[in-house]
Image (cartoon, rainbow, N blue to C red):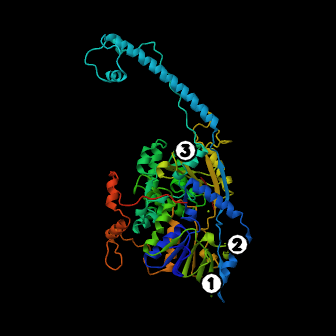
């Protein structure tokens, strides 16, 4: 349906991303008329971009910052004519206000054409000289063989090669079998390490899927349970996290979290292994041992010290298993540890899953609400909310169309400041604070097998904001990576050779509004605000305290995200009962071909897949990629 020809009335109008897409899917599944809008692209601040798409997003962001207030005033004059007498208007943000302090640095070199030609010429000369030398040696060997056979004076090349590869039936003379002792051996060609240039990054840009928000899925978390319950998991693929690492005393170490990891660890002594296993076993059912739990209102760090754990074990549990901060209370820390341990073993040796092609796949999966009668429009937003007697009754979209609705669900980024009252291999690496004033940093390392980058590594660093993203994260980047002082510069052979070389860095701050109380918004009662991404590693906050809570307010008597039927169970209404197969056959006849004909032209595949593969996304906390 064309975006400028939408129906004029819906039950629910939803504007936003991950949480909002879950609400849209839940509402449309129970028969509500849903209009789901997104300002620019799938997933908003939860999006995954190709490198080229990310560069376009950066340019759009810079262009938005340069817009003058007069441009917004001219747009408002156009839709104010649609406001009726007695109605008031609440204007929404036309641009995203959640991103700030965006900075981009490129360290990949673009080599000069002359250098490339020179390198190629030197290599060609060396290869040609080696080939000539090998040919000369081959000729001398052939002459030796010819001298032993008086009848064969001028054998052709094919016969000679065939003779060399056949096993001799008769015994040959030693002279034809042995190589001369003093024959010079060709020197091996030195292996030249290929540089990844900026042009190479752009050329391979579609192989990247870079998340704006770096998160993982707990294998027994609420989001995974919801994906399974609603059958939405069929639209995505996931990969188990390979390992969990931590930075301790300037070294990267693997965190022993499962029983096998603990007893196989070379970093722990036998005494430490027993102490750690005893503590982790206690955490699994700590509620059953109130006599050992006396620090409920004291910091979790103090509680770990009271358990007589070594500094090594305290660091592993606090930073890489519970993954909490210094202000976390003991009960919350124990629950975080318990949740981590209960997620172990469901899909692998680590408790986390990562969606192939990036986190932006999750909102896209839930945006399948159109299957059940919902309407989804990209690059289409809401300019204002029409209010009548403290209740929102309609919205006016960016095309100037007035759309009536019973409820409006909107992301926090669309709310203006005056409308709120004031009251943050796939490997996971935790980096403790470098000093008392700096935050702890969480780093997710993604390889090309996660379908998020070209051969190499894509790294996300996230922390709670203290200053700008660059101020918070640059010390950690300098500690763990080699940052060239100029594009193309490489580390000295004996210095920092173990550190990966950075090619491209982007810093930005994203506002975390998850701590705001819903009562702080001065909005009508039928307008529901969903906050954007929060600073936690998982997604449970967006599912429990956001999507399901808002759905209960909208439709308290309906089931939240009931399972979708299998495609073969869907019955289509029409003039007569028509099966899905008949519909596809009819469509194939209209196109002059059939599905069977297409299959005959293709080679049979070893693994037949009944579902379509997931496609990459098209287009306050500190973050760096």
The circle drawn on residue 306 is: none
Q: Foreground residue, 547 or 10?
A: 10
In the rendered view, does 35 fall on the left or right side of 575?
right
Q: Residues within 10 Å of mark 1 (few under 14, many from 20)?
A: some
In the picture of the structure, the residue carrying the numbered disc 2 is 72
Q: Are marks 2 and 3 in contact (CB under 8 Å)?
A: no
Query: What residue is drawn where x is 61% and y is 55%?
Result: 55
Q: In terms of image quadrants, where is residue 180?
A: top left
Q: For residue 111, which quarter of the picture?
A: top right
Nearest the eye: 550 or 110: 110
Label 2 SS: helix
Per the image, label 1 sits on a secondary structure element best described as: strand
Q: CA distance from mark 2 to mark 3?
A: 50 Å
Q: Which residue is mark 3?
A: 252
Q: Which residue bears the numbered disc 1?
A: 387
Name of the residue lying farthest toward the left: 169
Residue at 68% from the left image edge and 62% from the top image edge = 63
Q: Is residue 373 above or below residue 318?
A: below
Between marks 3 and 1, how big is the CA–CA gap? 56 Å
Q: Nearer the viewer, mark 3 or mark 1?
A: 1
């Amino acid at each position: 349906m064309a975006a400028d020809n939408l129906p004029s009335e819906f039950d629910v109008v939803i504007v936003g991303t991950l949480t909002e897409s879950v609400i849209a899917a839940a509402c449309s599944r129970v028969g509500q008329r849903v209009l789901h809008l997104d300002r620019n692209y799938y997933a908003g601040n939860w999006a995954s971009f190709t490198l080229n798409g990310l560069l376009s997003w950066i340019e759009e962001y810079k262009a938005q910052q340069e817009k003058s207030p007069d441009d917004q005033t001219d747009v408002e004059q156009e839709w104010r004519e649609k406001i009726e007498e007695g109605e008031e208007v609440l204007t929404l943000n036309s641009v995203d206000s959640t991103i700030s302090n965006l900075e981009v640095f490129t360290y990949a070199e673009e080599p000069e054409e002359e250098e490339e030609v020179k390198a190629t010429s030197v290599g060609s000369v060396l290869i040609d000289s080696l080939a000539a030398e090998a040919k000369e040696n081959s000729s001398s060997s052939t002459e030796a063989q010819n001298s032993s056979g008086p009848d064969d004076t001028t054998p052709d090349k094919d016969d000679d090669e065939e003779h060399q590869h056949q096993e001799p039936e008769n015994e040959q003379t030693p002279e034809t079998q042995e190589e001369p002792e003093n024959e010079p051996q060709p020197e091996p060609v030195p292996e030249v390490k290929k540089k990844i240039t900026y042009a190479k990054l752009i050329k391979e840009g579609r192989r990247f899927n870079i998340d704006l928000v770096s998160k993982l899925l707990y294998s027994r978390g609420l989001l995974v349970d919801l994906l399974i319950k609603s059958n939405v998991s069929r639209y995505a693929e996931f990969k188990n996290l390979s390992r969990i690492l931590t930075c301790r005393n300037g070294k990267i170490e693997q965190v022993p979290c499962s029983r096998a990891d603990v007893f196989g660890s070379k970093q722990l002594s036998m005494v430490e292994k027993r102490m750690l296993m005893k503590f982790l076993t206690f955490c699994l059912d700590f509620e059953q041992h109130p006599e050992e739990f006396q620090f409920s209102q004291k910091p979790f760090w103090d509680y770990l010290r009271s358990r007589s754990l070594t500094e090594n074990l305290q660091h592993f549990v606090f930073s890489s298993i519970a993954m909490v901060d210094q202000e976390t209370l003991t009960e919350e820390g124990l629950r975080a540890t318990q949740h981590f341990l209960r997620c172990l073993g469901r899909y692998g040796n680590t408790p986390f899953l990562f969606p192939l092609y990036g986190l932006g796949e999750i909102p896209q999966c839930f945006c399948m609400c159109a299957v059940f009668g919902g309407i989804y429009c990209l690059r289409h937003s809401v300019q204002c909310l029409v209010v009548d007697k403290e209740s929102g009754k309609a919205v006016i979209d960016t095309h100037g169309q007035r759309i009536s609705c019973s409820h409006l669900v909107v992301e926090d980024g669309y709310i203006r400041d005056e409308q709120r009252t004031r009251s943050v291999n796939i490997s996971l690496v935790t980096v403790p604070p470098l000093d008392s004033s700096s935050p702890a940093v969480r780093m997710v390392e993604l390889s090309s097998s996660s379908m998020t980058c070209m051969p190499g590594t894509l790294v996300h660093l996230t922390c709670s904001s203290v200053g700008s993203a660059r101020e918070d994260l640059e010390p950690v980047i300098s500690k763990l990576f080699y940052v060239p002082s100029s594009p193309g510069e490489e580390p000295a052979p004996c210095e920092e050779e173990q550190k990966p070389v950075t090619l491209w860095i982007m810093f930005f701050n994203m506002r975390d509004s998850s701590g705001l109380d819903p009562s702080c918004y001065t909005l009508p009662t039928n307008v529901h605000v969903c906050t954007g991404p929060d600073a936690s590693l998982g997604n449970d906050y967006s599912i429990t305290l956001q999507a399901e809570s808002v759905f209960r307010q909208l439709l308290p008597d309906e089931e939240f995200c009931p399972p979708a039927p299998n495609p073969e169970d869907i019955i289509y209404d029409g003039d007569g009962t028509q099966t899905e197969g008949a519909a596809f056959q009819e469509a194939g006849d209209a196109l002059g071909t059939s599905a069977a004909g297409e299959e005959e032209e293709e080679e049979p595949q070893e693994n037949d897949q009944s579902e379509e593969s997931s496609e990459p996304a098209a287009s306050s906390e500190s973050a760096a990629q």
